[in-house]
């Protein structure tokens, strides 16, 4: 039997799509979790670990040759990844796959800089590696639009654009890369269309049958200039998904209406 694949962040949105795909491919999976749980699938094991604190990583990597690193947060990704890389080196891991974000090397915000730090830790580890940079997920844009729709007037940052991609398409690509040979930094994965922030809010409001005033605002500083320059986009030969933001919205709104 093949060694288990260790998946960090396996309980998140992306992990929820990745795990069944790995199981369909016949692989056993070990999932890092701060709160271990029992699994109804004998091919999936949840183990306790704190990547940021460095606790439990060595035990989780016992017998593992491939790691799919999905775990991430608003800050600390570089620190958590360095802890994982150090333990993976000790364990003799043969392939480390990482999901990063388009703009990691161009957008001057802490989240992107931490992602770049994580990329560098992996690339300099001596472990054969693969890194995929993806655009923001539809799920993130939905969360943003839902929060903004609660305001009586929605601020719309001028010049900020997104190229959102479906998380299921990212999961499928990651599983393909995980089961393949180490490939270094591969082509970006982005969605099929580019949207301004106003477009995102407007289409969400229309889908939910809501109306709000929208007010243009300007994002100052280096971050504003980077977004206006499209540094968070991948327009030159990325791998492009097929599901649009509109497709995703139709599905989500239908689910909400059925529950209601």
Image: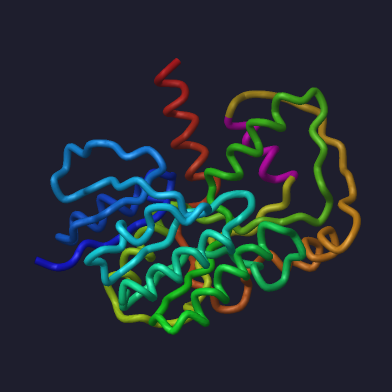
Left or right: 206 with respect to 165? right
Is 203 or 147 nearer to us in this picture?
A: 147
Main secondary structure along the magenta-highlighted residues: helix
Q: Where, by quadrant of the figure, is residue 38 drawn?
A: top left
Residue at the (80%, 42%) spot, across then down: 156
Instruction: Give the number of callouts.
Output: 0
Q: Position of residue 220 (x, y in %)?
A: 90, 55
Read off the magenta span.
Answer: 198-207
Left or right: 186 with respect to 225? left
Q: Is residue 210 above or below residue 178?
A: above
Q: Where, by quadrant of the figure, is residue 254 drawn?
A: top left
Q: Where, quadrant-wise, is the N terminus in this rendering?
A: bottom left
Left or right: 220 with respect to 172? right
Q: Where, by quadrant of the figure, is residue 58 drawn?
A: bottom left
Q: How is the image coloured?
A: rainbow
Residue at the (40%, 70%) spot, across then down: 97
Determine the residue located farthest toward the top in the rendered image.
260
Q: Position of residue 222 (x, y in %)?
A: 86, 63
Residue at the (32%, 69%) spot, across then down: 178
Indicate yes or no whether the magenta region holds residue 126: no
Residue at the (38%, 82%) spot, across then down: 128
Q: Position of residue 203 (x, y in %)?
A: 64, 39
Is 20 or 165 nearer to us in this picture?
A: 20
Is 207 or 21 nearer to us in this picture?
A: 21
Indicate yes or no whether the magenta region holds residue 201: yes
Q: Position of residue 91 (x, y in %)?
A: 31, 72
Q: Where, quadrant-wise, is the C terminus in this rendering?
A: top left
Left or right: 163 with respect to 255? right
């Amino acid at each position: 039997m093949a060694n288990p694949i260790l998946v960090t962040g396996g309980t998140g949105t992306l992990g929820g799509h990745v795990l069944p795909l790995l199981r369909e491919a016949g692989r056993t999976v070990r999932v890092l979790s701060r709160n271990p749980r029992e699994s109804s699938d004998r091919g999936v094991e949840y183990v306790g670990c704190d990547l940021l604190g460095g606790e439990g990583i060595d035990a989780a990597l016992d017998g593992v040759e491939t790691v799919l690193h999905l775990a991430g947060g608003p800050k600390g990704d570089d620190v958590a990844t360095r802890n994982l890389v150090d333990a993976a080196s000790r364990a003799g891991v043969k392939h480390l796959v990482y999901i990063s974000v388009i703009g990691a090397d161009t957008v001057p915000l802490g989240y992107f800089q931490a992602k770049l730090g994580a990329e560098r830790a992996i690339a300099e580890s001596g472990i054969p590696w693969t890194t995929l940079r993806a655009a923001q997920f539809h799920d993130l844009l939905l969360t943003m639009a839902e929060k903004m729709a609660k305001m009586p007037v929605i601020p719309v940052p001028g010049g900020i654009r997104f190229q959102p991609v479906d998380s299921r398409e990212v999961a499928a690509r990651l599983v393909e890369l995980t089961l393949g040979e180490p490939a270094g930094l591969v082509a970006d994965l982005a969605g099929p269309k580019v949207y301004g922030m106003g477009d995102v809010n407007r289409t969400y409001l229309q889908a939910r049958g809501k109306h709000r005033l929208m007010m243009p605002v300007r994002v100052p500083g280096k971050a504003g200039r980077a977004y206006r320059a499209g540094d968070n986009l991948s327009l030159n030969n990325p791998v492009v998904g097929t599901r649009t933001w509109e497709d995703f919205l139709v599905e989500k709104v239908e689910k909400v209406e059925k529950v209601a």
